[in-house]
Every structure is written in structure tokens, then in C-alpha cells.
Image (cartoon, rainbow, N blue to C red):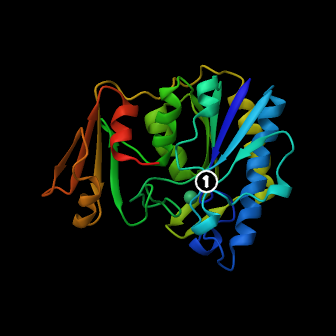
Amino acid sequence: MKILIMCDMEGVSGIVTWSQVNGGAPMYEEGRRLYTEEINAAVRGAKRAGASEIVVVDCHGAGGDWTFNSLVPELLDVDCTWVAHHAWSRYTELLEEGADACLLVGMHARNNTADGVMCHTISTVKWHNLWFNDDLVGEVGVNAALCGHYDCPVLLVTGDEAVCREARSYLGDGLTTVAVKKGLSRYSARQIPPIRAREMIEAGAYDALQDLSAVAPYKPSSPVTITIEVDQVEKMEDFRGRSGVELDRAAQKVYSRGPDWMTAWDQVWYW
Ligand SMILES: [Zn+2]
């Protein structure tokens, strides 16, 4: 059984501020240790469930050379390999080989979620809202659609209560979720201590992998319209002149249309 673990930092227990997730900031070293140990917990759960190959992908943009490069190598469980410093949502090697399931660990809610700790969608300053057809999604949705393109289901989401709720809204109630904190605002939370959170994540990963068909691969129905609402009108220019893409300047919206999700996504997302 081949398992892909895509992970982010903002949904880890103990993390509530940018200085815990931005490379070089005073609290970053603590943040990356907390991050690495939650990933290890998911690896242990997957291993116990029978995974023969586990690939971890660091999806956290920490800035500079820390971007997608925040895991502490010497702390990582020896039974995985991990992808560092690769373009966001562009690692597809294991999916092409036939990954059986994806686990999303340490996730945060989409932008504008009142109880979403450090909530944002891709960029904290650029993307106000993102829809795949009628689904209002966050980064969980992007990762799930990428996996869905290769017929790989997302079976586990961990993070705060808000991202667990969001993920179930478009992946369905068959999804296993593990909430390690409850957001009280964007930068505060009532949390489960990391040691307990890791036990819950390990158990969640194990449980999630007992039924590989519990969640259908996430495939927005074709043809697909991806809608991006940008924060500032000048951000529209980033999407000007692309094939398959239409701009509605008055609404500050960008529409990308394609026969399938991947085609529509490739028109707006870069390497
Ligand atoms: Zn992140």
C-alpha cells in the first residue's frame, strides 16, 4: 500500500502565530519540531495499517530556502521518504505510480473562516476566495483535487476544528478527521497538547486506512470552472492573457474553464 502524506504547519497543535511558521522567526525552530512530530505520528499510523511505501510532502511556504523545507530531517521517522522544496501542489510522482490514499496533516481552513486558525487560501494577501465549480474550497480542496485527478482519495484531514468541518463539506462524511485545536480567533486557539494530539493523529491515520473506499476521489464534475476572487484589483493582472481564462474586473473574479480540473488548474497555477 502506497501512502502519500501532504502536510502543512498551520494546523499543528501548539502553532497559532506566523512567527512559529515563518523561516528564521524566533519561534520557528519550535514550530518545525512540533510539525515534524505530528507527521511522524501519521507515518506510524500508516505503517501500522500496512503501508509499504510512505512519501511525505512538505507543503508549507515558510519563506526563502525554508519554503517547503520546514521538516527537521533528523527527527523524521525512518520509514518514510520526504519531498522538500518542490513546487506547491506539483509533486505527482507517487500519484502517477498509483498511490492508494492521501493523508492531509496539519491543515488550515480556507480564507475568511471565523474560527480558522491562521486561515488563508494559498496566499494571505492575494486569493480572497476559491471555488471549484460550486464548492468553496481551501488548500484541502486543491490537494484533494490533485489527488482526485489520479483517482487517489484523501482519507484523513488533521488540523483545527474549522478545517475538519470544511474538508467534510466537500469530501463527505466518510472522511476521518482529527481536530487538534479549536480556533477562538485567527490567532488563538484552545488546544490539545502535542503529545496527546500525536496519539490521536496516529490512531486517525490507522483508522482511516482500514477502508480505502470510505471517501471517493475528489473530482469536480466536468467541465470544470475554477473561480478565483482576488483581494486587490491589481492582482487580476497575474491572470491576464492566459488561455481558457476570463477576467471579470468589476467582480474581481477570474474564471478558468477546462474539460477537467487539472486543465483548468494548469491555466491559473504555475510551477
Ligand atoms: Zn502553511
Q: Is residue 241 left or right of residue 164?
A: left
240, above or below 78, in the image: below
- Point out the residue furthest to the bottom here: 26
Residue 258 can be seen, yes or no: yes
Ligand 1, seen in the image, is in the quarter at bottom right
Q: Position of residue 197 (x, y in %)?
A: 74, 52
The reply to whether the residue tagged 1 has its Cβ within 8 angstroms of ligand 1 is yes
Give the farthest residue toward the left.
Answer: 250
Q: Is residue 196 left or right of residue 88?
A: right
Category of crowding for the residue at label 1, using alpha-carbon neighbours closer than 10 angstroms: few (below 14), some (14–19), many (at least 20): many
Residue for badge 1: 8
Q: Residue 269 vs residue 52: left or right?
A: left
The amino acid type, in three-letter code, at marker 1 is: Asp
What is the x, y in percent for residue 73?
A: 80, 56
Q: Is residue 193 visible?
A: no
What residue sits 72% from the left and 36% below the top?
205
Q: Where does the image place residue 106, in percent across and percent down from the top left?
A: 63, 52
Residue 240: x percent and y percent?
22, 53
Depth check: 191 or 20 in front? Answer: 20
Marker count (numbered): 1
Where, by quadrant of the figure, is residue 210 drawn?
top right
Relative vertical location of residue 258 with respect to residue 37 in this rendering, above or below: above
Task: Please state which of residues 204 and 245 is positioned toward the viewer in this rendering.
Answer: 245
Quadrant into which the N terminus falls:
top right
- Kindly identify the residue that appears in the image at 31 percent across and 24 percent down: 222
Residue at the location (50% across, 44% down)? 140
The relative height of residue 15 versus residue 147 in the rendered view (above or below) is below
Residue occupying the point 53% across, 22% down = 151
Task: Determine whether the residue tagged by mark 1 lies in a helix, strand or loop.
Answer: loop
